[in-house]
Image (spheres, helix red, strand yellow):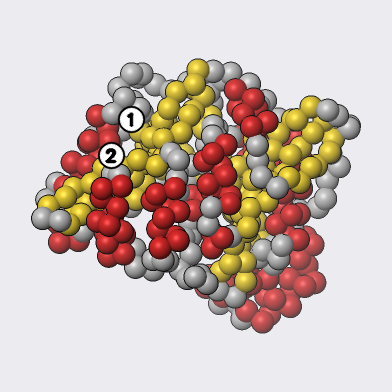
Amino acid sequence: MGPAQRELVRRFAAATWPERVQSEAFLRWRYDDCPVLRGYLALRGGECLAMVTALRRPYSIGGAETFVAESFDWFCLPRYRGSGLGVRVLRRLMEDPDPVVVIGGSDDTRELLPKLGFEIPGRLVPHTLPLGPRRLAEVLAQRAKIPPALTRAGFRVFGRLLTPPRRRGPPSGRVLPVTLPGPEIEPLYRAARQGVVPMWRVDFLRWLCAGYPGLGHFVTLYFARGDELAGWSLLRVFAQAGGAAAQLVDLFAPEPDAELFTWMVAETSAAAAGLRADVLTAYTTSPELALALRRNRFRAGEGLPIHWWDRSRDALPGPLFFGGQWGDIPLRPFPEKWWE
């Protein structure tokens, strides 16, 4: 996938995901400007029939840096399903030297990937925290048939019991809001000597945070102990029907520490609440971060399988530190309309 196929990709995207914005500005940001995007296409007669894309980003695996392809937007036009074209484009991606990781996916995807040699080293667990009455009212109306008006009234009375309390930081701890993440976060990831940790490239982060306004507002928080940068978090707040929602894109410190994470989660949740988000979603494979989320009153959901394919190693070293930074998680939901 490259500039020569730009128009074919755009036609394929419009036919496959018509609910997304299809403006020139969005498509240029999505397919042309991303510094780590790659992909393979099945073409015939001037038409794209199938596609797979991936973000090629560095990972720390047992303290060694290697590039990994985070694969998503794997799709075949409905009239060609069963033809094998979807499998062919994925196999072409697997021929590259980089390991490939796919998280979640449809039932068909989860059934097929193990047959192609993908292992499942762990699961990425979603966590949710209600920050306002709207999302809680929707859930209770659906599951318990409680009228939304009654839920909203109850939230005004008991909401403080559901949302996380403000927490005291460590001695000399400080929270520093910054405009955009910079190269100072890269040493945090290089300091991770164990397990599997997705890393960031600054150009990729800036493409994500400042590339397309319709994706929402990103909040970057640095957490310092004295003069030392101890960790950071990245929050996305975006519009939804009737309100706003938030995602914890990443929250990281080199040494897993439930006490430090608890403070970081509390401060990031307060930032989401201050921007009037009704719900905050986080993902993690880390037991320490999961504990910090529970301490801040998040509720865990069903884990998503992590599918990993790698010709160079039989097994991944633990622990895994995947989160909401993987693949297209921080891009979803894509904007459906924007002022352009």
- Residue at 19% x, 61% y: name it: 78
Residue 296, x across and y down, in percent: 72, 49
In the rendered image, the vertical position of residue 262 relative to residue 163, given as above or below? above
- Residue at 23% x, 46% y: name it: 41
Judging from the image, what secondary structure is the residue with disc 1 in? strand
Residue 285, x across and y down, in percent: 54, 37
Left or right placement of residue 217 versus residue 65 in this view: right
Left or right placement of residue 228 versus residue 51 in this view: right
- Asked whether disc 2 touches disc 1, contact meaning CB atoms under 8 Å apart, the reply is yes
- Residue at 14% x, 46% y: name it: 84
Residue 240, x across and y down, in percent: 56, 69
* Residue 323 seen in the current view: no
In the rendered image, the vertical position of residue 301 relative to residue 251, given as above or below? below
* Residue 25 seen in the current view: yes
Q: Which of the two residues, 287 or 264, is positioned nearer the viewer here?
A: 264
Judging from the image, what secondary structure is the residue with disc 2 in? helix
Q: Which of the two residues, 288 or 26, is positioned nearer the viewer here?
A: 26
Say which residue label 1 marks.
Answer: 309
Q: Quadrant of the N terminus?
A: top left
Say which residue label 2 marks.
Answer: 113
Residue 325, x across and y down, in percent: 53, 42
- Residue type indicated by callout 2: Leu
- Residue type indicated by callout 1: Trp
In the rendered image, the vertical position of residue 33 relative to residue 229, given as above or below? below
In the rendered image, the vertical position of residue 241 relative to residue 290, given as above or below? below
Sequence-first tag of 2 and 1: 2
Q: Which of the two residues, 145 or 170, is positioned nearer the viewer here?
A: 170
